[in-house]
Image (spheres, grey):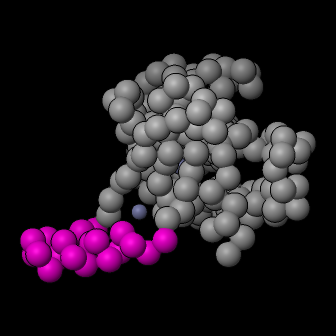
Amino acid sequence: MVTQLTRTAIHVPRSTLTQGMGYDIHNATMLQKTLYSDMDAILRRIRDDGFRLTRIRTAMVKILFDENRPLTSSDIQAQLSSSGIEADRTTVYRELLFLLERTIIKTVQFADHKMHYEICVDHHHHLVCTRCNKVIEIVLGEHLEEQEKEIYKRENFKVSSHSLEFYGLCANCL
Ligand SMILES: [Zn+2]
Ligand SMILES: [Zn+2]
Ligand SMILES: [Zn+2]
């Protein structure tokens, strides 16, 4: 329940979540706790599946969690670099592929056509500000499930997943 509620929060680096910024501190702390235990679970899963938790692999999972927003491979490369890990593009791509294959992360593509990557935490959509490029995560109600049932009825097409981004202006840019 907590996750559902707080996932509608604006994407901000997780490290700043507890410093206020108009967020509900109580909820932010709970969110942090929930997601960090998820991160540990992911790292454990990788290890239990017999794969090595290399420094770069661990760092990339942590970055994707900490940043709490869809990142491009260059974003990740820059983050790695600022935490003292120099990784070339090929290495970053190889690790992204590894995380994608294990469905630890998924791809998100915005109107800029750049591939973004984010941790698979729960099903949500994105509100993308076309002026400042801020990305806000939002959990919608059940009406899309109804649409999917409707699609199956009308088109005999069984939907297995969907991706939905909304473009517009955020509160700061309105
Ligand atoms: Zn949806
Ligand atoms: Zn904006
Ligand atoms: Zn997202």
Q: How many marks?
A: 0
Q: Position of residue 143 (x, y in %)?
A: 39, 73
- When the figure is inspected, residue 4 is found, relative to residue 68, above or below; the finding is below
Q: Position of residue 129 (x, y in %)?
A: 52, 34
Q: Is residue 39 left or right of residue 143?
A: right
- When the figure is inspected, residue 10 is found, relative to residue 111, above or below; the finding is below
Residue depicted at x 56% and y 51%? 137
Q: Magenta part of the protein: which range?
A: 141-160
Residue depicted at x 49% and y 48%? 126
Tell me the quarter of the image containing the C terminus.
Answer: top right
User: Residue at the left extreme?
Assistant: 155
Residue depicted at x 9% and y 71%? 155
Q: Is residue 70 left or right of residue 39?
A: left
Q: Is residue 162 left or right of residue 38?
A: left
Q: Position of residue 105 (x, y in %)?
A: 49, 50
Please name whichever residue, 41 or 137, is drawn nearer the observer in this view of the structure.
137
- When the figure is inspected, residue 81 is found, relative to residue 168, above or below; the finding is above
Quarter location, residue 86: top right
Q: Position of residue 36 (x, y in %)?
A: 75, 57
Confirm whether the magenta stretch covers residue 35: no
Residue depicted at x 43% and y 32%? 93
Tell me if residue 95 can be seen.
Answer: no
User: Residue at the front extreme?
Assistant: 174
